[in-house]
Amino acid sequence: MEQLAHLYHDHLQVLNGRVAEIISRENLSGLVIHSGQAHRQFLDDLDYPFKVNPHFKAWLPVTDNPNSWLIVNGIDKPVLIFYRPVDFWHKVAAEPTEYWSEHVDIKFLTKADKVAEYLPKDIDNWAYIGEHLDVADVLGFKARNPDAVLSFLNYHRATKTDYELVCMRQSNAIAVTGHQAAKTAFYNGASEFEILQVYLSAVSQGENQVPYGSIVALNENAAILHYTALEQKPPAQRRSFLIDAGANFNGYASDITRSYAFEKNIFDDLITAMDNLQLQIINMMKPGVSYVQLHVETHYKLAQILLDFDIVSGDVQGLVEQGITSVFFPHGLGHMLGIQVHDMGGFLGDDKGTHIAAPDAHPFLRCTRELDVNQVLTIEPGVYIIDSLLAQLKQDKRQSQINWNTVDTLRPFGGIRIEDNVIVHGESIENMTRDLGLNR
């Protein structure tokens, strides 16, 4: 905590500097950042799980307190309007006493609809940052999520402060503990549902606390990219296991994926090949390298693996250009990571909002920027047997390049994805996930 306290001071200085620059550019007095508010379920008296505004938790690790507000202008001490209602139905947030609290001026709000009393009087000159535009309208904000402000903040938040990097290393450490426990549960015969419970217990976070819905897939289910159905009974035959799961620390996410074979066979060999591919791509990372080029290079390396395992025939160039590799690897290489699992800013070429579109041949790529120092990204190549995509190959001449017997052999295993969380440094690459002991 002493390290976090020291680094947090510097973190706030960086954020204040960013705000000072953008409000000067846009002729604003400052920003009023709303943590958000609860959403009531339709025809019910219960709320959906609360998800905090990412721009709010970029400033301080308050992730579970709706109806709170931050007032920042880049010069004065940030003002936190902290919601503490009189409520005997729910637990009320304690008064903040953590390391960060001394760096903000805290005012307590007991009734959410009285927040106007705490906001700047010249509200016309302040910009509202948040989800609830109806609330902003009632409060009199004329500037609501200005594009120029959001583009600026989203672009620069790709560059992590030292405080943020420490938080992300810790979120990786928590998730690695869960992954190791889940792996053991798989080999011990647990069902998908049981493996998830083991994972959540190991990371000490509930389903609504982890940064995204965990993917726990056995056998063929590993070919469903966002599989969350979770069968409660173990399969009759245990072949493969894919887990894509992360953890949170102070609002910062980790996002890690591993694939396993239950026995030594062709699928296990394919996992080893994909693991080597992933490490080769990570070794290519450095400031100035295009993330798009890393993605394209992944397809060329995957093409060679598909040839080596007699899954396809032809040549590397042709397999990529004909879109055959995209059938086996349909998603992007990865994305930016931080206070969101898919951090905003991956398509921004500059802080004015210039959009860099994904290539037409790779529409699902989530990052098109050049790498720079202190960016954090995921690298997650995959290979899958997805029948709906393979069916498209059967409609044209490309079908002759597919070894359908090998495809049939691999189909019961589903697919493979291997994902690490990586920091770009000036002279090196830091693989947080591997450094914490989660290897092949």
Image (cartoon, rainbow, N blue to C red):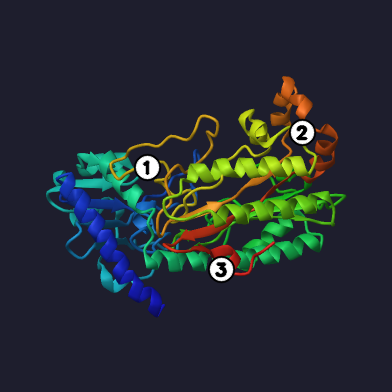
Q: How many marks?
A: 3
Q: Is residue 50 left or right of residue 10?
A: right
Q: Give how far across and how far down residue 239 sits, in percent.
A: 82, 51
What residue occupies the far left of the structure in this picture? Answer: 122
Task: Measure the C-alpha gap from mark 1 to mark 3.
Answer: 30 Å
| Residue 432 picture quarter | bottom right
Q: Give how far across and how far down residue 387 sits, in percent.
A: 74, 32
Residue at the location (26% across, 45% down)?
Answer: 149
Q: Earlier in the sequence, mark 2 or mark 1?
A: 2
Task: Measure the C-alpha gap from mark 3 to mark 2.
Answer: 41 Å
Q: In the rendered image, is residue 96 in sight?
A: no
Q: Earlier in the sequence, mark 1 or mark 3?
A: 3
Report the mark closest to the observer, 1 or 3.
1
Q: Is residue 246 left or right of residue 252?
A: right
Task: Measure the C-alpha gap from mark 2 to mark 1.
Answer: 38 Å
Q: Earlier in the sequence, mark 3 or mark 2?
A: 3
| Residue 436 picture quarter | bottom right
> Can you identify the residue that label 1 sits on?
348
Cβ–Cβ under 8 Å for marks 2 and 1? no
Residue at the location (23% across, 63% down)?
Answer: 78
Report the mark closest to the observer, 2 or 1.
2
Q: Which mark is residue 173?
A: 3
